[in-house]
Amino acid sequence: MKERDPVKAHKKICGKIGIYSRVRIGRKSELSLWYTPGVGKIASYLARHPRKAREYTIKRNAVCIISDGSATLGLGNTGPYGALPVMEGKAAIFKEFADVDAFPIVLDTQDAKEIVQTVKSIAPAFGGINLEDISAPRCFEIEKRLKSELDIPVFHDDQHGTAIVVLAGLLNALKIAKKNPEDASVTIVGSGAAGTAVTKLLNQAGIGKICVVDSHGMVSSDRKNLNPFKQELAKITGIRKSGSLEDAVRDADVVIGVSRGNALNTKHIRSMARDPIVFALSNPIPEIHPEKARKAGACIVATGRSDFPNQINNALVFPGVFRGALDSGVSEITDAMKLRAAYNLAGLIKKPGIGNIISSPLDPGVVKAVAKAIR
């Protein structure tokens, strides 16, 4: 089948989502029930009992996808217009896979205080907030403040969705490579939102030795001028001596790329331990092309793309996270929930293979498995 041109396809449909009504308004009786005067009684009731909004409005099933376009995919700072088609895509996935009504909101500001205030101002209409494609380190502070100041779940998908799916895929990959998770040596290339969250969740899961690399080399306690977030990473990993990317990947069992396209080469892969595992997750351009990684000796290769085997993408996570959160009425997505979600997701693959370490986002069991962890 001929591959479709994404630009032409997107232009033809003029947006991937729309609004539809859950009720029919074709008669005067229906108009008076669902709009005025009937809706006035609901308005008056909720003015007196705002916490009942989940029972009477879209809030019960609505998520706001918020982005400022400062870190869109692996493309960088695209601004709000570059972020909008991505947020639309996420909204379509929310609806298609989990029947969640998600609204893409892109902001024409990259000021952290303005973003926090804007989200707080529109939060009453939603049952959850999905932060997306906001650059580090601002994303950490934005999420922290919103979590503390809102009574609905706030979930930065680039961080936690990525971490959950990486852990799930890694658990199965290590089984195939016959490597013990507690003894595995893992190098994470990228110390931004995804790299930070992946490091923390792998550490909580008891994965062995972890090393994080940024544009200046290994994130270690002997480096000067580390920001507080990277100081925390150095403390978690226990890396005390700095080194290059080459030093970090040498003899590693696993390399997880969450940085930029073409950050890795075949020499890096050849220097790794036996049967190396390579997760090249940058989108749309992986850190190394899967075929090159395999020819260099990689035992298992995964990317974030849907056109290669082993898609490690947060699309496997966020629909189920919010489906579970909305159904359970939880106000926070905890670390325990994230770990359960990762193990549930990994458990869907009964017989892992080198081209089958994670389920497809199209598998209807994925949303159920992840949602079950959010309770």
Image (spheres, helix red, strand yellow):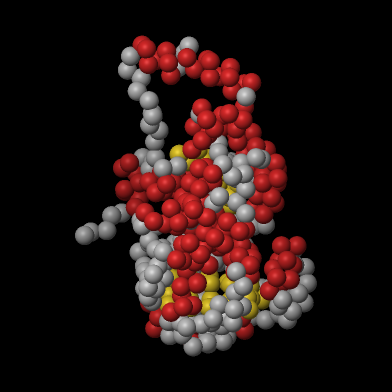
The answer to whether residue 271 is visible is yes
Direction from residue 286 to residue 116 in the image, left or right: right
Direction from residue 113 to residue 80 in the image, left or right: left
Direction from residue 152 to residue 104 in the image, left or right: left
6 or 374: which is nearer to us? 374
Q: Residue at x 78, y 72 (%)?
A: 224
Q: Residue at x 62, y 39 (%)?
A: 119
In the displayed structure, would residue 109 be above or below residue 269? Answer: above
Q: Residue at x 63, y 76 (%)?
A: 211
The image quarter in which residue 299 lies: bottom left
**Quadrant where the N terminus is found in the figure:** bottom left
The answer to whether residue 292 is visible is no
Residue 367: give x, y in percent of width and height.
43, 53
The image quarter in which residue 303 lies: bottom left
Residue 353: give x, y in percent of width and height.
37, 75
Residue 74: give x, y in percent of width and height.
51, 60
5 or 89: which is nearer to us? 89
Residue 256: give x, y in percent of width and height.
53, 72
Q: Residue at x 47, y 83 (%)?
A: 178
Marks counted in the figure total 0
In the displayed structure, would residue 178 be above or below residue 330? Answer: below
In the displayed structure, would residue 100 be above or below residue 280? Answer: above
In the displayed structure, would residue 100 be above or below residue 348? Answer: above
User: Which residue, as the protein is rendered here, is positioned at the far left?
Assistant: 1
